[in-house]
Amino acid sequence: MTRNDETHTFTEADLAHLGEGTVAYLREMGGEELNGKFPGLPRIAPDAKLWALFAANGQPILLSDERDRAIASAFENDLTPVSIH
């Protein structure tokens, strides 16, 4: 076993691009929050619950009423889905 004592410093810009093109974040969201995250989307009822898929940099990718469908879309686009709360 080897030990690596190197310290790496990441800038805010580095962190913003971490996982870009490889990771997608999956999150269940209510209509009220979705209305703010997906500009141009028709108004969604505040009590609606949908699954949102975001790129690593936070850009919205898609909405689905089924979690499995959102996960499948991530895989179809060669992205690794990660759940967040």
Image: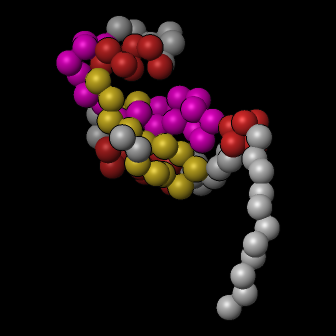
Q: Decide if residue 20 is on the left or right side of residue 25.
A: right
Residue 44 occupies which quadrant of the picture? Answer: top left
Q: Give the image's coloring scheme.
A: secondary structure
Q: Does the magenta stretch include residue 20?
A: no
The magenta region covers 44-62
**Image coords of residue 55 (percent x, y):** 58, 38
Front position in the image: 18 or 47:
18
As drawn, which residue projects farthest toward the bottom? Answer: 1
Residue 17 seen in this snapshot: no
Front position in the image: 18 or 38:
18
Residue drawn at point x = 40 percent, y = 13 percent: 35
In which quadrant will I find the N terminus? bottom right
Q: Decide if residue 2 is on the left or right side of residue 48.
A: right
The vertical placement of 66 against 82, above or below, is: above
Residue 47 occupies which quadrant of the picture? Answer: top left
Residue drawn at point x = 33 percent, y = 49 percent: 68
**Image coords of residue 76 (percent x, y):** 53, 51
Residue drawn at point x = 39 percent, y = 9 percent: 42
Q: Decide if residue 39 is on the left or right side of residue 20.
A: left
Front position in the image: 69 or 24:
24
